[in-house]
Image (tube, rainbow, N blue to C red):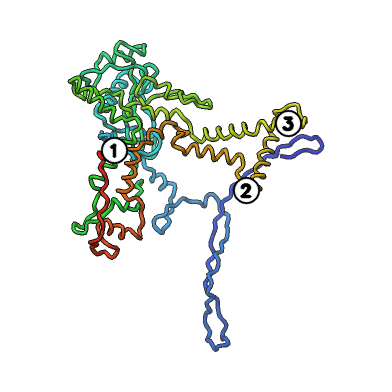
Amino acid sequence: MHVNDETGEVDLIPLKHEREHVARIPKYKHKSEPASKSDENGGSDGVKETGENPEPQFDFKPIDDDEIMKAFNYGSSVIPVTDLLNESLKFPSFTGIDIISLEDKSSIPPWYYQGESVLLVTPENASDRDKRAFNLLTQAMLKLDYVAITRYVQKRNATIKIATLTPVKILTEDSKHYEPQLEQEEDVKRKFDDIENDDNESAVTSTGPKDYYGFVLVKLPFKEDEKIADFMKISGVFGVDKFAKKETHPDEEMMAYMDEFVNSMDLDNLMNLELQHAKDAEEQEEEPEEQIKNPYGREDVFVELNEFDTALPIARRKGLEFQSYGRETFNDITRKILALNSPRIHIVTRLLKDIVIRFIKIAVSEAESTGESEDHESATTPLLHRLISDDVKKANAENRLSVVDEIIESIKAENMDSSSGNLFIPDLVQKLDSASFSALVSNMARLFDVQYNPESEKKDAGKRRGRNSDGQDDEDAGEEEALPSIDDIFNMF
């Protein structure tokens, strides 16, 4: 861009970019230099070692595009690849999703799922025959709790991927507020009357709203994607039986404490809810399966499509918590988590609000006293900046916290204080802050011995076995305090 001095107009000068390839060629030098024919000590002719490795030097040579060729590293060798060989190296693949096998959902570990999930549904222009086949397959897999292992290629000659197809039921505005009637017997395939009702224009029929089914596609890893990491073993769990010459695993008491810990972390008490359904069924002299068989109580079966209000601040009673009212598509805690945004947004908003409230009155009063501007809002911003800067300088001189630091510390203390709740979800800490849960955690810490110290591991293990630091049997070793059982812990409260 150039400004013309005579006309004052801006002239745009086009830029031309030329790409140039340069090859870096190393220069090889000997690490030794010739010595003199004779030295003062009467040495003979030869080579004198310098004892220093010279720095590598390179020559740069421009090359053309025709001189560039692709190559592959095979060990320590470089194999050039021509255009013909490059075409033959491409693995031919065709587009599609092919089901390899159907497996039980519980047989696939959760950490096998990789990447983002993709929701697959039937297209609008699909035929009725394809829609029925698609829906019948999803219903059968939902009933049997199966997932499909598939070969997945998104476009022609693309990389072949392996993925899982998890069947889900998609809720709509009509179906998510509908309470279904439990049937005594439910077949894998729906009746033909229900299938014909899906073809009607009305979304709600005599048998209820139309059901929409789909699959969630998630990528699975190959063998070369496996990452194996070695972690240290917890001293209280890991042990070696020298007589059996094998590692000892956690005992029954440890497993019982861990089971109790996992169940206590379920804030929605889903397990207790199922047990309550079973208890009610026994009182009504009915089979428990008929009460728990309601698929609307299973979170992993449903995918709910909601429209979120992105306006800030986000109210706690909007989003999923409001739109999912009356249905058990998500539990209470899940709805609260999905309805909120990041805690950082709330903390920053709260911090700015407190700072403005603290300084804005002083800034406005100084703007009115100076009379520099009738527009108080225009004078507030620079004065607010000056007041904060002056307060920081004064606090540093007096060796105290500034007003901004005091506000930050108060927010941190309030966020960490369990009695005042948490900025993310206020009532979560109160549910976990109980005497029984604290006793459970303290006993687990003593039992599992999570403080790992490699130097004192043998010494601590010897003390637990009643031995001294020398490895000999210690007859004077006191008996270890017996840990109370889970029943004893909960009977105390």
Task: Residue 486: name its quadrant.
Answer: top left
Q: Which residue is mark 1?
A: 492
Q: Residue, x 28% and y 40% (percent of image)?
A: 489
Task: Residue 381: name its quadrant.
Answer: top right
Question: Which of pointers 1 and 3 lies earlier in the amino acid sequence?
Answer: 3
Q: Quadrant of the N terminus?
A: top right
The amino acid marked with disc number 1 is Met
The answer to whether residue 162 shows anywhere in this view is no
The amino acid marked with disc number 3 is Ala
- Tell us which disc is closer to us: 2 or 1: 1
Label 3 CA crowd tier, 10 Å (few <14, some 14–19, many 20+): many
Q: Are marks 2 and 1 in contact (CB under 8 Å)?
A: no
Q: Residue, x 39% and y 22% (percent of image)?
A: 324
Q: Secondary structure at mark 3?
A: helix
Q: Residue, x 36% and y 11% (percent of image)?
A: 202
Question: Which of pointers 3 and 2 lies earlier in the amino acid sequence?
Answer: 3
